[in-house]
Amino acid sequence: MRDFISDRARNIPPSGIRKFFDLASKRKDVISLGVGEPDFITPWEIRGAGINALKNGYTQYTSNKGLEELRQEISFYLKSRFSVDFSADQTIITLGASEAIDITLRAIVNEGDEILIPDPSYVSYKPCVELMGGVAVSVPCSGDNGFKLTPEALEKVITPKTKAVIFPYPNNPTGGVMEKEYIQKIAPVILKHDLLVISDEIYAELNYGEKHCSIASLPEFKDRVVLISGFSKAFAMTGWRIGYVCAPKPLLDTMLKIHQYTAICAPIFSQYAALEGLKQGKLDGYQTVESMREEYDRRRRFMLGAFRDMGLECFEPKGCFYIFPCVKNTGMNGEQFAQNLLEKKSVAVVPGVAFGEFGKDYIRCSYAYSMNNLVSAMEKIAQFVKEIKG
């Protein structure tokens, strides 16, 4: 059967996140900090809306773009929360943010086009670019400056073949964010080279400190940003597979064709559930989102202190629900550390190299788990580090 598999598909490595998750699932009593899965249950009002949709017989296709009312609510939400102006007609409801990433890259990448990706970053960007025949170009980001994208780093890698830059902030795996002042620093480089920006803002509601600034809110970027987001993280709706993408109309129309042929539409009951989430948020000031963020913040501060107490260099994450400590002073790289930690202490973390070559000396730990699990895991990791250092 190998003869039937395309070369591109064959050469794409499996997800480094899932690799360690699968290893952990085969062992008993493993504490996993590996997967970015909120431990909160989807709020009842949202679940109830999904249930009622099924009870009321809403089991058909929607339009390819998705429910008109949901797209209107997304437009209002983006405008009121982040000062971003996309109309309902510039929005497609997708099967999570993952499909939005996929159809965006399918719509823009020609053979040999270069797409810039901050490194470290989410695991799916590079494979999606390469499956389209594009070239994924890493832009190194350092913990020394909060894993921010810098104009100098961008300029070094831009060539005549560069078409777009992926802008994944708040960042998975580092927890790094790009405040408005830093976005304004890189803006001239992007405009000078006439690049498209693909802004993955799935963690926009999980900022600890300054409110998230969307690059799409800057007037000069109004017509050159594709904004990708969804409901999985902030609304604890991972299994509902509901996301969205907003883009200038000519590009969105092309993306819609790809969406029509591959997904048709997102599940109707998930769309009604997401609609209820936005309606409730509009009424109560997004109290559910705020309460989840407060709990994540408590866990974030605990994890940061614990890693620093055990002598590991650790950047303070400003967004998402991940922490990205450097393990270099243990004499191991991230992959060796993660493997040994799993074998000796039954704690699963993700090697930083899964997110790019510049993450090789790091591990990613999710704090989207109960505090009891986090305390137990950190005790085991501290024991492990102490044993290594003697």
Image (spheres, rainbow, N blue to C red):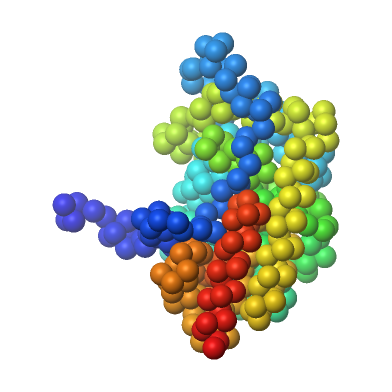
Q: Residue at x 32, y 56 (%)?
A: 9
Q: Position of residue 320 (x, y in %)?
A: 67, 56
Residue 207 seen from this side:
yes
Q: How many marks?
A: 0
Taking 74 as reference, is 55 left or right?
left
**Position above or below: 271 against 378:** above
| Closest to the observer, 337 or 289 | 337
Q: Residue furthest top?
A: 56
Taking 306 as reference, is 365 left or right?
left
Residue 358 seen from this side:
no
Q: Residue at x 60, y 16 (%)?
A: 52
**Position above or below: 42 against 343:** above
Q: Residue at x 59, y 61 (%)?
A: 376
| Closest to the observer, 289 or 165 | 289
Taking 118 as reference, is 217 left or right?
right
| Closest to the observer, 359 or 89 | 359
**Quadrant hosting residue 305:** bottom right
Q: Position of residue 370 (x, y in %)?
A: 63, 51
Q: Position of residue 157 (x, y in %)?
A: 57, 75
Q: Position of residue 55 (x, y in %)?
A: 55, 13
Q: Quadrant of the C terminus?
A: bottom right
Q: Residue at x 81, y 53 (%)?
A: 211
